[in-house]
Image (spheres, rainbow, N blue to C red):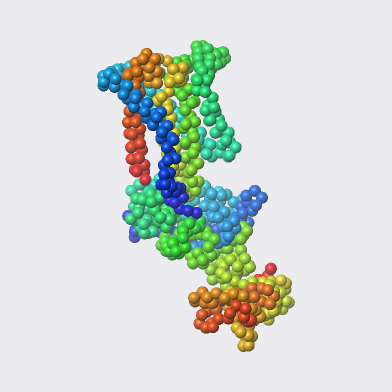
Amino acid sequence: MTTTTTNAGNGTTSGQLHAKGAELRLQGVRKSFGDSVAVHGVDLDLRPGEFLTMLGPSGSGKTTTLNMIAGFLEPDSGVVTLSGKDITHTPPHKRDIGMVFQNYALFPHLSALKNVMFPLQMRGVDKKSARRRAELALEMVELSHLAKRLPKQLSGGQQQRVALARAFVFEPGLLLMDEPLGALDKRLRETMQVEIMRVCREVGSTVVYVTHDQDEALTMSDRIAVYNHGYVEQLDTAEGLYERPTTTFVAGFIGDSSMLSCQVRPGGDVVGSGWHTAASARDMEPGKATLVLRPESVTVRADGTGVGGCSVQATVSDVFYLGSHVKYLLRTEAGETVQAHVPRSEAPTPFARGASVVAAWKPEAGIVLAE
Amino acid sequence: MTSPASAVRRAPLRAVSGGWLLALPALVFLAVLFLWPLLKMGQESLTDGFSTYSDVLSSTVYRRVFWTTAATAGLVTSICLLIGFPYAYVMYRSSRTTRTLLLAVVLLPFWSSLLVRSFAWIALLQDSGLINQTLTGVGILDEPLPLIRTQLGVLVGMVHIMLPYMVLPLFATMLRIDDRLLLAATSLGASPWRRFVRVFAPLSAAGIFAGALLVFTISLGFYITPALLGGPRQTMIGEVIADEVQQFALPTASALGMVLLAGTMILLGIVVTALSRAKERTA
């Protein structure tokens, strides 16, 4: 039994809903409200089936971008194309994009099943096959047994599943999710992250996901676009953002890090207060810069003997036992803070607060960013 | 963000011991000034036994008046809904200033006396009134239109008075509709019209019901307006009861009142049942 009413859907024979992931492209998309620019010329390019997360603090332009993709807002300039088709000015109800809202936005007067049938009926699918496909979608989010319930009779997590089923039931090429887990508690959020990833993989749609939670972004995404003040600061995989941040904002936003101010000298030597590395920034212009250190690449020693790489004198200003590792906050003589995570196995007797130590790292572990 | 399920829920009053005492003044008021007179009225209607009721119910005159009353109230309710819903919708979609202005316009009738307004309608609608004089004056009509002493006159006067009772509950209900539901409907492929039919209108249903209930029940008891603007064929039950009282036929007047009350309650019962069935079906 197949239904071939939606343009993106390619019907189902195996008791599964499956969409053909669409290619999404944003070119120089810009939006301002009055005098304030919400989104400065954003370029994004999504492969079919890719899971892209827009991550950033609130007000950084990620939701505005999402609303322009959905069609709720028209960009001031720039082009949005979906599967090669220019949709910049297409009204939202003709875009065939599934969307999950932060507060789920389930229709309170309709049962879970009728909510999921809604987009199918809007596309002229006859009632019988709409029903069958909605049941299939609810099955995929493991909610078949609650199909007859009204939204208010469902828990937050269950409502979220209905909202998800409703967004993919018409097999759209693109799924948009606007902080869908924002209203759930931490444990449920983690379960739902895995659930959403599974469903998205099964359905096969391209996904644009908005969140301000970096763990969520790192867990779920193929690639992450980090937003700040209306710009995409960096677009990369989770690993790329963590290992190779290109701005101090990204370095600070993704994972923990210490930032030490420094100078790049002609020839690539990097000199900070109380430390230096030789020729580690050879391709950089001389000038002021910041050294970014991830806490797990910093080791803490009693003295400088046998330290091969870089090091700086510091005092322990705080020690935290975090089970798997010990977290140190160190204060350098210049007053800068260095964070270090030392595995428990390497620190059988941790340093006490106030101890004079040496923080050391390998030159290649430090990321030098120009200001 | 809380889930919609927990968003609008109040702490139960019974947490405060004796909280129901707060309702006591109103309960006493209703018991003394409404329930007691109602019982007295019931007693009065039975002065001559059930024969008064059989007379009232078998009289073709009374039956016709009852029918006119229900039909008029029904028509007024429909017209109020028909023009009140779009009005409330425009208010809902308007900016703050426009909204306040529209609200003031619809509330205007509330601020003047019902009697004054009915007489004002006479001045406008009668054969030598403003409308007919203008129309005959400019030569559009040779004869004045029969605007007064007709059903039309009664409907115009009553709708004018009852419109706020429809618009206000509708507007209040619409204000509570979450905008994001409309966005969701759009993103799921609903055109503006289907979004209205499938989402906005059902979510306004509570307001439609509240408004229609208010307008219909209040309209049933109208007395001055049909008396001034209607003809003999537009006589409503309120006028008949008043006549009977003036002729000291208290048992008949009481029996008519009781029949009106019972009829209204039966009708409402049917409507409420039908609506909750319909709600279950759509869910």
Position of residue A209 relative to residue B134, above or below, is below
Count how many numbered circles sit on residues in the image. 0
Instruction: Say whether residue A243 is left or right of residue B279.
Output: right
Q: Is residue B246 left or right of residue A364?
A: left
Q: Residue A11 in the image: state x and y as whole percent.
A: 38, 56
| Camera-nearest residue between B74 and B222 | B222
Residue B64 in sight here: no
Where residue A362 appears, as percent x and y from the top left, is: 61, 81
Depth check: B3 or A82 in front?
Answer: B3
Residue A258 in the image: above or below residue A28: below
Asked whether the viewer can see residue A228, the reply is yes
Which residue lies at the image location 61% right of the left edge and 60% below the top edge?
A228
- Give the answer, above or below, for where A365 lies relative to B147: below
Q: Quadrant of the C terminus of chain B?
A: top left
Q: Decide which of A172, B195 is in the foreground and name it.
A: B195
Residue at 51% over, 59% down: A209
Q: Report whether B52 appears left or right of A364.
A: left
Quadrant of res A225: bottom right
Give me the residue at 33% from left, 34% from top. B269
Q: Residue at x 52, y 75 (%)?
A: A321
Taking depth in this image into account, of A127 and B228 the one nearest to the observer is: B228
**As drawn, is A349 to the left or to the right of B63?**
right
Q: Position of residue A117 (x, y in %)?
A: 39, 49
Residue A227 falls in which quadrant of the image?
Answer: bottom right
Give the quadrant of residue A314: bottom right
